[in-house]
Image (cartoon, grey):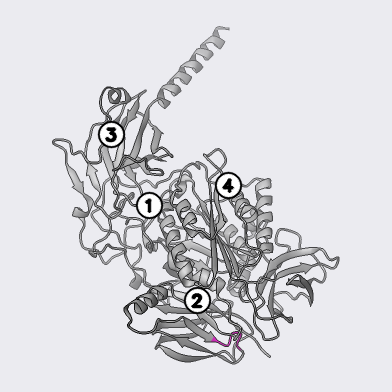
Amino acid sequence: MKQVLVLLCLALLALSAFKLNTGTVLAGKITDQNGEALIGVNIRVTKGSTFIKGAVSDVEGKYRIELEPGAYDVEFSYTGFESKRILDVNVQAAQETTLDMTLHSGALLEEVVVVGHAVKSRREAARSEAATYSDKKPAGRKEESRSAKRKSAPTTAAKPAPAPAKRGDPYRAEPATYDDAPYTPAIAKDELSRESESVVLYEVAPPDDDTGKPVPTPGRPGQPAPRAGLLTAGEWNDLHNWSKHWLDLQADGEIDAYQKMYGFYPKQRYTLLLQNEQELPITDAAIQMLDQKGTTVWEARTDNMGRAELWNGLNGQATTGNLTLQAWVDGEKHKLGAAKPFAESLNRHKITRECKHAQNLDIVWAVDATGSMGDELEYLKTELLDVIGSVKAVNPDLAVRMGSVFYRDKGDEYITKSSALNHDIAKTVDYIRKQFAGGGGDYPEAVHSALEEAIYRQPWSTEAVARICFLVLDASPHQEPAVLESLQKSIREAAKKGIRIVPVSASGIQKDTEFLMKFFGLATNGSYVFLTDHSGIGGKHLEPTTDEYKVELLNDLLVRLITEYTAVPSCEGKSTIRFHDQQAQSGQQQGQGNGESMGPIVYYPNPASHHFTLELPFDADKVTLYDAEGKAVRSLAQLSAGTHTVPVNDLNEGFYTLRIWKGGQVQSGKVVVVRA
């Protein structure tokens, strides 16, 4: 009995010690210069060169961080506001230490560092006026401006990025003092050869302000303030690199473990091209692939070029025997006959139908908002808002609707929260602005819940030229059977509804998640986008499993993809490509009365059998035509404004990507090559 009592006392002592430790808290409220609470401010606590904890302010601008007693450095950062850093904050044992903060607006303002400021405990604060440290300079203390320590930009590459943090940490561990070196991209553009290296850089320049000086970081040392045009990314489409890349991965067994892990087996591919009798695409037609019993094996919808991607056995056992295809167009069923695997040929069919296309474009942004996204979410929000603003200008004839889904994980403040697809783009913009990173804590997140919300609950258009879901994330889904089943059902439903899934992977993503995202892109006729280290922003990014890829600014890349997914040949067989600055330039020219507005790039006929004509309204740096394997089959440099002829009579029948470079931007369109 005595032994039991002794053990019980020891347990109570341990419990009391634990409670005593958890009573040591740093807390406060963050406001702007007008006294308004700031939601989603990033708070970062370090000791020396070691990251300790991070948090974000809640809807009342408040934060609360449990710590061990001691002295810490505390850093506050928020998009559009100057950052503040308080050194030697003394957190008392078993007390709630108060550190309120006022941040001043102005993303490009210099960062103020207050060294060695005292902090009042909760008891002291109750006896006197609450102190803030945004605009007070204590006697005898030193206040430093980070930009004053800037030097001229070096020509060498920046220092290696720090190692990724553990899941749930919203920041990466790094030195608490600022480096003298200004921000530079991780790799300079001219360090890589466009011909000999696996990565091709194109006009990725270090960001600066209007004075030409590097922009100070609002949150992380050595990084610029969040604004559009900073993040760099690459795109890899495995459908366009099927035979010489994806099938090689299959043959080598490199992805066997990932296929088994998630239950996705993208092996038996069938591709359909549906046209009318004038060889113009029939868009947004419902396509079914059936087995011998008439059971549906896969469903999809034709895209803006009349193409549909279908799969046999994507989530398990493939159907044996002959498969057939049928299309539903304007409520009428058309039997298309036997389905031929992609390895044999393209399933090309024609039906009688007038030339017409839906003018609706639906885009949903599904974004991981857990704490581990804290290093890049503010940058991503800025980029997405810029893309939203550009899409309408690039697609003036489309009825654009946008919505968003933000997700975290079970046990967090929320699992998903969303704004519905609507024509009021300002509502989507306002909703995205209000979101911030928080929660998480383990590696897997509620990806399946985000897809359920985006695919099943968003009011997608019944008729559309394109439906796109950009899935932005840095962590894998949970490995539970129910979760995996949900993922598989959501992807099948997305393909059925014609929703392209385009994952955008951020820093910290792992190889299994990369391949799951590739599976999503393959199954839904989408693609795979990944952030790269070339911007120098965020933690270390996973090197993608690709062959040669081109590094672009993320906002330009996303606009390019949206344009590629929505461009439809006219009823005269003419296709257009528009750069997203052309609209502004046209407006300036018209406003100044200095001539006619600059029109889009036009190429025709599309489909083409012998050649197509390319009309350029400006001088192009480069024009390249890629086949379905990503190989450049035509490459023309320094083309002047005017009319050019591009031969295609020696090319195989199929889909090709036309890319045009101009002044550091790249846009693309589709070319269909057919044989009589």
Name the foreground residue: 611 vs 632.
611
Pointer 1 residue: 162
Q: Is residue 203 left or right of residue 351?
A: left
Measured in 3D between alpha carbons, the distance from the residue under mark 4 to the one under mark 2, in whole angstroms, is 34 Å
Q: Which is nearer the N-term, disc 2 or disc 1?
A: 1
Q: Which is nearer the N-term, disc 1 or disc 4?
A: 1
Is label 3 in a helix, a strand or a loop? strand
**For the residues bearing labels 1 and 3, Cβ distance under 8 angstroms:** no
Q: Quadrant of residue 584?
A: bottom left
Circle 2 crowding by C-alpha within 10 Å: few under 14, some 14–19, many from 20:
many
Q: Which residue type does callout 3 highlight?
A: Val
Measured in 3D between alpha carbons, the distance from the residue under mark 3 to the one under mark 4, in whole angstroms, is 36 Å
Pointer 2 residue: 668
Q: Is residue 382 left or right of residue 329?
A: left
Helix, strand or loop: magenta stretch: loop
Q: Which is nearer the N-term, disc 3 or disc 2?
A: 3
Spot occupied by residue 369 in the image (x, y as percentages of width and height)? 49, 48
Q: Which is nearer the N-term, disc 1 or disc 3?
A: 3
Name the foreground residue: 396 vs 45.
396
Instruction: Tell me the mark number nearer the camera, choosing from 1 and 4.
Output: 4
Pointer 3 residue: 89
Q: Which residue type does callout 1 highlight?
A: Pro
Instruction: Tell me the mark number nearer the camera, choosing from 3 and 2.
Output: 2
Q: Which residues are magenta?
A: 604-608
Pointer 4 residue: 446
In the rendered image, is residue 443 in sight?
A: yes
